[in-house]
Amino acid sequence: MKIIKSCFRSLIESSIKHLSSTLGRKIRYKYYKNKFAHCGKNVRIDEGVIIEGAENMHIGDNVWIDKNVILIAGKADVPEKFITNKSSFENNEGCLYIGDNSHLGISTIIQAHGIVRIENHFTSSAGCKIYSLSNDVQKCHKGTHGSDDIYYIKSAITIESNVWLGLSSVVLNGTIEKNSFVTPFTIIKNSFEANSIISGNPAKKIKDRFVNLI
């Protein structure tokens, strides 16, 4: 029965995924509104969007999920012995939160196998990636008898209000405090204070974003 239900759900999602125009967006909103853990008002889901683990997603009001965005949530099937760096998740492991008045740009990927909290007025430019579970490349090695021992870093990521991620930037860990801007192609592995312009690999604060911000 579970297999039948899964196949039926996949068929529906595939059929509505590429419906264009206002009608397509209305159908996708109505369908996913009942799938999300929480879904606010006026949520726009454009063509080509892939959503896995909707029951672990909390979506605010006036959220625009642009074309070909990928959203993944839910606990990952990874043995704890292979987690080398695990954050505290406060019983919300695998959850994705997206605040009000946010825009996920074209082809943004958010993977919330750890936890991802995004507050209000967030913008991601095209091609941004937020990963709360990634490989620990310093630990991965060939195991006994030629097997691969793959290790992971599971993170808690928080992005506070009015943060803008520039083109193709990557967030792997930490907190980006409010009113900050991340320049294109930056890779974030640590936390940054409010009102920062953040750039580079490894990422660094290069200056304040706003002058005389109250």
Image: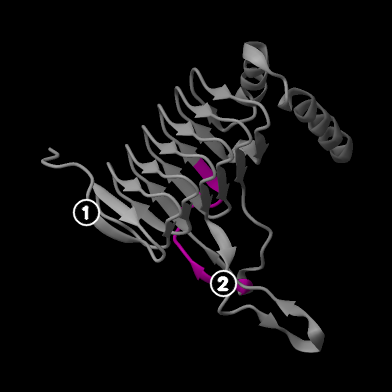
Q: Is residue 42 visible?
A: yes
What element does badge 1 sit on?
A: strand
Is 68 one of the magenta-colored residues? no
The structure residue drawn at horizontal position 84% and vertical position 33%, both measured from the top left corner, is 5
Left or right relative to 75: residue 200: left
Quadrant the C terminus occupies: top left
Q: Residue furthest top?
A: 23
Label drawn at residue 136: 2
Q: Amino acid at mark 1?
A: Lys
- Which element is circle 2 on? loop
Q: Position of residue 99 (x, y in %)?
A: 42, 33
Residue 193 in the image: x percent, y percent?
A: 25, 54
Taking 135 as reference, is 147 above or below it? Answer: below
Amino acid on which the number 2 mark rests in the picture: Asp
Q: Residues within 10 Å of mark 2 (few under 14, many from 20)?
A: some
Q: Nearer the viewer, mark 1 or mark 2?
A: 1
Q: In the rendered image, is residue 89 in sight?
A: no
> In the rendered structure, which disc, 1 or 2, sits on the residue that comes first in sequence?
2
Q: Nearer the viewer, residue 97 or 187?
A: 187
Query: Which residue in the protein does label 1 denote?
Result: 207
Residue 126 vs 149, above or below: the answer is above
Q: Residue 147: x and y, percent?
A: 78, 80
Label 1: how many Cα within 10 Å (few below 14, some 14–19, many 20+):
few
Q: What range is drawn magenta here?
A: 82-96
Is residue 54 placed above or below 113 in the rendered structure?
above
